[in-house]
Image (cartoon, rainbow, N blue to C red):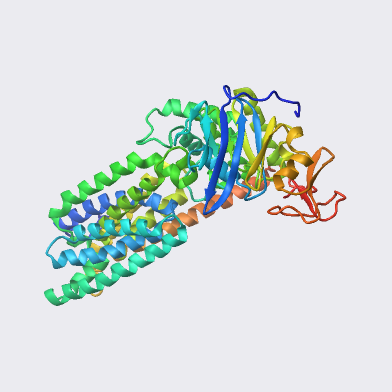
Amino acid sequence: MNQVLRALFAPGFFASDPVHAALVVGAVVALVTGAVGVFTVIRGQAFAGHALGEVGSAGGSAAFLGGANPLWGFMGVAIVAAGLIELLGLHRPRARDVATGLVLGAGLGLAALFLYLDATSSSTTGVAVTILFGSLFAVSQQMLPSIVALSAVSLVVLAVCYRMLLLSSLSSDLAAARGVPVRALGIAYLVIMAVAVSLAAETIGAILATALVVGPPATALRLTKRPGGALVVAGLIGVAAVWLGIVLAYDSYYWPPAGHGWPVSFFVVALVFLFYLAAGAVTGMTQARRSRRSERAPRRTASGCAEHPGDAA
Amino acid sequence: MNVPVPDPSADDAILNVDGISVWLAGREVLHDVRFRIMPGEFTGLIGSNGAGKTTLFRVILGLQTSSTGSVLVGGRPLTHRNPIIGYVPQKVFFDPDMPLRARDVVGLGLDGHRLGIPLDWGRRRQAVDAMLDAVDARRFADARVGNLSGGEQQRVLIAHALISRPRLLLLDEPLANLDIGAEGEVVALLARIAREQRIAVFISAHDVNPLLPVMDRLVYVAAGKTASGTTAEVIRAEVLSALYGQHVDVLRVHGRILVVAGAEGPPGVTFEETDGVAAGPGVVSL
């Protein structure tokens, strides 16, 4: 048992301060992105979520240039971008996609500029890698209270809007008829998503942020049919991916090329993807078993679908 | 039950639509529409696709403003969120990925417009179970809505609309995309609800025939104009000809009604060859 533990956790894992911070930040962010991301998936806004993360890299790199923590840049720009998408996109889904694409392109252009200036001013390319691909071990300890507070606020707002979001995700017509302010709710949701994506960008990088916002929720939707359950399961899957990713990244210091270690973001994203595939295999097996069972028992009712003369019009 | 029903009076009407006209993108979609619906009555809103049925529903729901006329619901002017009205929209697409069971959808009918998280679990569950029983949907209560059949999903949506105890139930084309068996079941269910719970059911359809056995009254829409009354009063050659603006015949074959257009045919109406009925081209089966 001890040997297994020693093989899994490399020496010094539990004594390392950066590891402690990474475990806490990673868990908090995974819980928020999991819960928020369930609605991203069922509202069909994965593309908007991805765009907010990438556009945020313009803010992250600008914040670095100005000497501030990238998180504030990520968040400021992502929220502005969310507003722009809503403003340009109007109500039609296709116009919305085009608006998202336009905002994404403009944001990445700015990111290219700021990252270039970052690299020339600090004469290192490391900052570009950190902004785009993140590094959980590099998250500043001072940011911990802010990250926890932002996460808590996001979860509270999500809880307050929970039922309205479910109803409007089901049918915006139905929600509007019940007096739900569908447009305002949509904007509020985009802002929560911008915050969640920014938190993910701070931990696993702007480009990989969507992996955490979309992956664990998509996996949870395969495993549970209850709305509340999906939020919790998505959060837990995210925590599992992040924690296991941290352990593997710490271990990888002993892997080739020795002494460098692999990026933690790689492990997190790879695990998120593997979990999704595994969940698919599990649901596939249970469905196969269920259909085999129902083949043995004949169906209760046969739906009448005889052609009726002169029925359609 | 095509017996003459006494003319509804304005005082008791659950819905009083009085001379509304609606313009959309420079076109008059509805012109001087007026009719009344009484409590517990089963009323059909009949017309072909694009005749203005959904627009009329949106006006009644307060989602679309009319340029003239007034609508009284339960004797009061329109408000944006009207608890008296239950609504089943056309074409709700339930994605199989949606983490919603049938009972979750029904529960959202109770409190889906509220902020916060539901707290009174026990009472909420009781109310949802009772509603599921009322529409005979208890056996698939815990299945994902996305995996249910069209008829089952329609039952769930009806339960969603009814659980807030409305006095008027609006259903937009609930029979579209249902097979014949499910169609009959949904119509029978709605008729039972209207009768037992004294809820006025107002249902839009492009085919009048499935509703004939249960309809007390109908509102016929064509080219933005309406005629209302009992089936016998409205579905007559003179009335429909005036509505369409050209000659229309009404045939009654084996208890079914066929509206037959003249040689050139009324605009905006689709023509179809109907099997089993000896009629030439230009038959519109309603």
Q: Residue at x 39, y 61 (%)?
A: A47
Return the x and y of residue B241 as percentages of the image width and height.
Answer: 75, 45
Determine whether B25 is above or below A56 in the image.
above
Residue at x 25% of width, y 70% of height = A110
Q: Is residue B179 above or below residue A116?
A: above
Q: Could you tell me which residue is drawn at 63 percent across and 37 percent down?
A: B203
Q: Left or right? Give the position of A267 relative to A274.
A: left
Residue B108 visible in the displayed image:
yes
> How many numbered marks have been drawn onto this rendered protein structure?
0
Residue B75 locus on image (x, y percent): 52, 25
**Quarter-of-image position of residue A158:** top left
Name the side, left or right, on which A88 lies relative to B136.
Answer: left
- Relative to A230, say whether A252 is above or below: below
Residue at point 31%, 69% (across, down) = A106
Q: Which one is in front, B61 or A297?
A: B61
Which of the pair B189/B24 is nearer the observer?
B24
Residue at the right extreme, as displayed? B278
Q: Is residue B107 left or right of residue B179?
A: left
**Residue A275 appears at what percent x and percent y?**
40, 57
A132 or A175: nearer the eye? A175
Q: Position of residue A292 (x, y in %)?
A: 62, 49
> Which of the pair A274/A224 is nearer the observer?
A224
Question: Would you say residue B89 is visible in this rendering?
Answer: no
